[in-house]
Amino acid sequence: MVDYEIDIYNIVATALRENLPDDFSTPPEEPQRGLITGKKLSAPAMFPCVSIVESGNRTDRGTQDSANAENHAIITIEIEVYSNIEEGNKAHCRKIAKVADDSLLALNFTKSMLESVANPADPKIHRMFGRYSATIGTDGQIYIQ
């Protein structure tokens, strides 16, 4: 199995912490700010929140060899961004999503969608959802799909 989920997660999470320190970087003496997770969430425990999850990993059959060895996989990464600030939660989500989006595009992922999603459970919380895909070789090389 071609498995680079943790590597991709770490790259995107690092970009979020470095580019948005007021949202995600926490000095040791202060309470935690923001949440970046590798799990899907139905209700985040803190805000802002970013979920970065590999939702698909399938063999690129065109690159299998005669022994059926997997040489490349088509990977799908999904991000979800949540903000609950009272004024400007949509803009806040978009600012956070842009950092994740830029990180994934720089890795050669192709964006298939990035949009606001209705949050009927709590309309005060703005939510954005994005889906990205790329072909990754067993050597970790990421190819634009």
Image (cartoon, grey):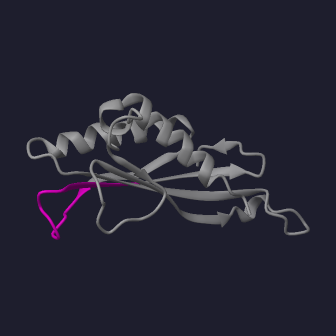
Magenta-colored span? 116-130
Q: Residue extending furthest front?
A: 29
Q: Viewed as shown, does residue 46 lie left or right of 37?
A: left
Residue 92: quadrant of the picture = top left
Of all residues, the one furthest to the right in this rendering is: 67
- Please tell me which residue is depicted at 55% across the width and 39% down the height of the picture: 11
Identity of the residue drawn at 50% across and 46% down: 110
Residue 94 image point, x, y percent = 26, 41
Q: Is residue 97 left or right of residue 85?
A: right
The verdict on residue 89 being magenta is: no
Residue 138 spot, x, y in % from top left: 77, 52
Q: Give the total number of marks visible in the rendering.
A: 0
Please tell me which residue lies in front, 25 or 126. 25
- Left or right placement of residue 22 versus residue 111 in this view: left
Q: Quadrant of residue 51?
A: bottom left
**Residue 85 screen position, x and y as percent:** 15, 46
Looking at this view, is 112 or 140 the one in front?
140
- Compared with residue 58, is residue 75 higher up or lower down, i.e. above or below? above
Residue 44 seen in render? yes
> Which corner quadrant of the image does residue 79 belong to?
bottom left
The residue furthest left is 87
